[in-house]
Image: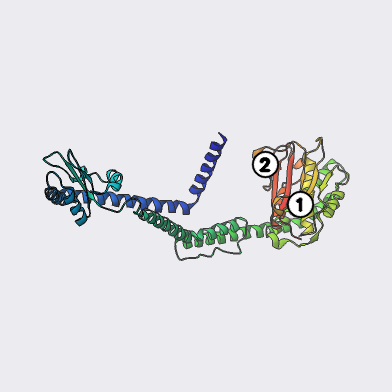
Amino acid sequence: MKPHAGARRRWREAHRRWRHSLRWRLVTLFLLLALATTAVFMFGTQRALQSGWQGWVKPIVDDYADRLVAEIGSPPDPARAAAIVARLPVTIRIDGPQVHYDSHPRDAALRERRFDPSHWGLQRSSADGHQISFGLAGPSPEARPRRLGWFTLAGLLLLTALAYAYVRHLLKPLEAIGEGVARFGRGDFAQPIVPRHDDELADLAGRINRMAGSLQGMLDAKRALLLAISHELRSPLTRARVNAELVPEGEHRDALLRDLGEMRDLITDLLESERLAAGHAALQTEAVELAALVHEVAAGNGFAARSLQLALDDGIDTVQADPTRLRLLLRNLIDNALRHSAGAAQPPTVFLRRAEGGLLELGVRDHGPGVSEEQLQHLAEPFYRADSARTRSAGGVGLGLTLCRLVARAHGGELVIERADPGLRVAMRWPAQA
C-alpha cells in the first residue's frame, strides 16, 4: 500500500505543479493541438483516399488483377507467376488442389497482418479451384528500417521543446512582475518593474508601477501626518505630566501619571515604528556580540529581579546589527512574556541559537496559557489584543510585537511566532553576517 500511496502523492504533487505552471499548460495545449490536428488530417486524408479508391482506382485495379490471373493461366503456372513478380513490385500467393506457390514466403506473416487482399479486391478464384492473392512487394521485416516513426516522434518532441522555449520567452516578464509585486508588498517602492517587451505584459507592469506609485504617495502622506501628530502631542503631554506632578499624592494622581505614561509610550512606539518602516536604511549597524547584549538586557530594565532562563549559544560570532533596535526587540519580547505568563510553572526562556540555513534565532519562549491558532495570525498587528488578559490594564500599548516585526524586517529577517504548548515562542530569525 505504501508504494501506491507514494505514487499517488507524487502524482498529485506533479498535477498541482502542472496546474500552477502557465508555461506547461500552454505547452500541453500546443501538444494536444498538434496531435488533434494530425489525427484530423490523417482521418480526412484516409477518407479522401478511400473515396478515390472506391470511385476510380478500384475498377482499374480489378481489371488489371483479372489480366494477371489470365496471364498466370489455369491451372496456375508458378513460372509465369515468378516472371510477373520479377517484372512488377507485387507479391503473388497461389493456394489450391494442384499448386501451392508464395513469391515472398518470408513476408507472409507481415502481409497478413498489414495487408488483406480481400479488402482491396486483389483476391481471385480460378475455374480449377485455385485462389490467387496479390499484394504490394516490399523489403523483408529485417531489412525495413522503422525510422519514420522515430523521426516523427523526435520531430514532435523538438516542436514541443521549441514551443516551451518560446512560451518561456513570452512569459519571462512574469518573473520580473512577480519580484516587483513582492518588493512593493514589503514596502520597497524604490525600484519599479522594468518591462522587457512592448506587449500586454509590459502594459500590466506599467499599471502595477502606477498603482505602486499611488500606494507610496498615500503611505508617505500617512506617515507624515502620523509623525506630525506624534511630535505635536509630545509638548502638551510633557506639560500635562509636569502639572500632574503637582497634584496631591493619592490614587487619582497615580492613575493620571500611569495614563500619561501610557500615552508617552504610545507616541514613542509610533515614532519608532515609522522610523523602522524605512527598513535597513533606518538601522545604525555595528559589530555586536549577541550573547553579551542578551546578558545586558536581562540584567537591566527591571528584569534583574524577575526569573529568566538564558539558553545562549556562546559560540556565535560577532555580527553586524543595530544594538539599539535589538535591545528594543528583546525588551519587548521579555516584557510580553513576563506579563502573559505570570503564575506559570516555569519562567520565560531567552534563547540565542543557530537555525537551519545559516540563520540566527534570538527570541523568548514563555510557559503561559498561550493563544489560539486563529489569534496567532494577528499577534503582530498594531494594537491587537488576543483576549481579556491582554488589556491596557495589564500594561503595554499593543505595539510591542509590531515593533519587533519591523526590527526583524529591517535586519533582513522575519519575526516567527509559534505556539509552544504551553506558552508562546517568539523569535527574530535573520541571516546575520559577521
Name the residue rendered at 33%, 50% in the picture.
141
Q: In the image, 107: left or right of 166?
A: left
Q: In the image, 3: left or right of 93?
A: right
Q: Mark 1, residues whose alpha carbon is within 10 Å: few (<14), some, or many (≥20)? A: many
- Residue marked by disc 2: 376
Name the residue rendered at 57%, 58% in the picture.
179
- Callout 1: SS: helix
1 or 2: tag closer to the N-terminus: 1
Quadrant for the N terminus in the image = top right
Q: Is residue 15 above or below residue 227?
A: above
**Near-viewer residue (98 or 149):** 98
Q: Position of residue 340 (x, y in %)?
A: 77, 40
- The image's mark for residue 196 is none
Which of the 4 image quarters holds residue 309? top right
Q: In the image, 288: left or right of 73?
A: right
Q: Position of residue 216 (x, y in %)?
A: 59, 60
Which of the 4 image quarters holds residue 349? top right
Q: Is residue 241 above or below residue 166?
A: above
Q: Mark 2, residues whose alpha carbon is within 10 Å: few (<14), some, or many (≥20)? A: some
- Residue marked by disc 1: 329
Q: Position of residue 294 (x, y in %)?
A: 82, 51
Q: Position of residue 33 (x, y in %)?
A: 37, 52
**Near-viewer residue (241 or 146):** 146
Name the residue rendered at 67%, 37% in the picture.
372
In this orientation, does residue 246 appear?
no
